[in-house]
Amino acid sequence: MNIRLNHLPTAELQRLDAAYHMHPFTDGDALAERGARIITGAQGAMLTDSEGVQMLDGMAGLWCCNIGHGRHEVADAAHAQMLQLSYYNTFFMTSHPPVIELSERLAELAPGPLNHTFYASGGSEANDTNIRLVRHYWAAKGKPEKKIIIARKNGYHGSTIGAASLGGMQAMHAQGGLPIPDIVHIDQPDWWSEGGDMDPAEFGLARARQLAEKIAELGEDKVAAFIAEPVQGAGGVIVPPDTYWPELQAICDAHDILLIADEVITGFGRTGNMFGSETYDIRPDIMTIAKGLSSGYAPIGGSILSDDVAEVINSAGDFNHGYTYSGHPMTCAVALENLRILTEEKMVENVRDNTGPYLAEKWATLADHPMVGEAKIKGFMASVALTPDKAARAPFASPKGTVGLRCRDRCFAGNLVMRHVGDRMIISPPLILTHAEIDMLIERAWRAIDETYEGLKRDGMFTAAA
Ligand code: PXG
């Protein structure tokens, strides 16, 4: 089979890429000057670039490749389904076996009464669905004025206009006049950066109670829902204090609002249970899923609704919403095969009982580095905060992200993919990582942090903000 353009030299691929391809979340001119690193193949947890160099994929693609790269069974499932039924819609009283089977499987896997899935092509679309859903739900119950959604600063829910509005990313809101009306944000549970003199437990409670305060301020009769990621991913793997989620759940229980758990990252094993909601004992009314649902082998996302929410929506006439690719046969077949591999090979249990604790033990050692302020981990998602002054939990004097980017570059140079969010370094590796690969990850991460540290000292940049 012809693997397109793989034969071209790297410089030519980079030139064509810069000339014709618009990259997401990228400074185009800066990229054109530097040239993209071209990834040509992947197997397991290892990526191969156009120079034939092997890199450890510490981000599972983009938080998604939970079962690892290159599984033939998934490709075979896609191939077989395309030949059987390449496409048919699910709009006008029609359905097909893969979407039926996947929906039943998700009802089995998702906790409690989450039994009914509405499909999208990714997490952003699914969260846009959620905005429509929760407002339609309350209108159907005779309360159309209940339409405000409370979300969190530095939360990430996607990049469409609706999802980016739910997110609390200032840089995104600054472009295009976001958020849309009736979405408001409370503070995040990032103790290391924002906890001040409070201890983490006290801080977790204080941040959770902002939800109750916001509901009181807006009026319960105006609030439709609260949305949050069990662990913020794109915000920097902010693992909340243990006091945070029980308090949030109690507040949601005490008020007549819906709880949406955005499990796009935390779903399908990432936190050591099938869902982050199980890890934190969260009882959502709606769960957003994507990424690990197909391990990135095909674009698919969705919203899993509780029995109550589904019943209200189903009995309210047409829900005037849907995507051409809602429940696409091939992506459903891919998701089913991915879930078969994930469950039959006990990958989630392995992260929970074996490799997760091993990674946690090794990840904690990074906190011994003089530039690491905190090392946090939940299952197979982890972060370190880089700082010039551990005791003071101080940020660097350089603009936020400068040090993180330097460290990211050292990681790339050392053949480890680790992302930076501001000056936090984060990982979210495939769930199949072996002990040896974990050792390799930690060794490369330490080296990258250390090279960054030496570079900062050399360049007179190892200084705290005034
Ligand atoms: N919710 C959460 C919690 C996410 O992490 C989305 C929704 C949107 O999903 P789609 O499939 O529409 O991208 C995400 C996506 C990053 C990064 O830089 C994170 C995501 C996407 C792109 C970049 O960490 N998460």
Image: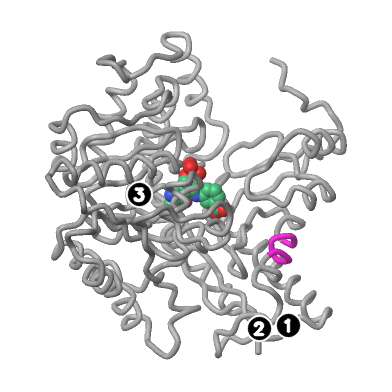
Q: CA distance from mark 3 to mark 2?
A: 38 Å
Q: Give the residue at x 32% y 23%.
A: 99
* Residue type (three-letter) at the residue carrying disc 1: Phe
Where 212 sits versus 464, above or below? above
Q: CA distance from mark 3 to mark 1?
A: 41 Å
Could you tell me residue 89's position as x and y percent? Answer: 37, 17
Residue corresponding to mark 3: 349
* Residue type (three-letter) at the residue carrying disc 2: Pro
Residue corresponding to mark 2: 388
Where 466 sits versus 293, above or below? below
Does the residue at mark 2 contact the one at mark 1 (Cβ under 8 Å)?
yes
- The majority secondary structure of the magenta stretch comes to helix
Disc 2 secondary structure class: loop
Quadrant in which the N terminus is drawn: top right
Q: Residue 402: in sight, yes or no?
A: yes
Stretch in magenta: 405-410
Quarter of image, res 46: top right
The tally of labels here is 3
Q: Give the residue at x 35% y 35%.
A: 344
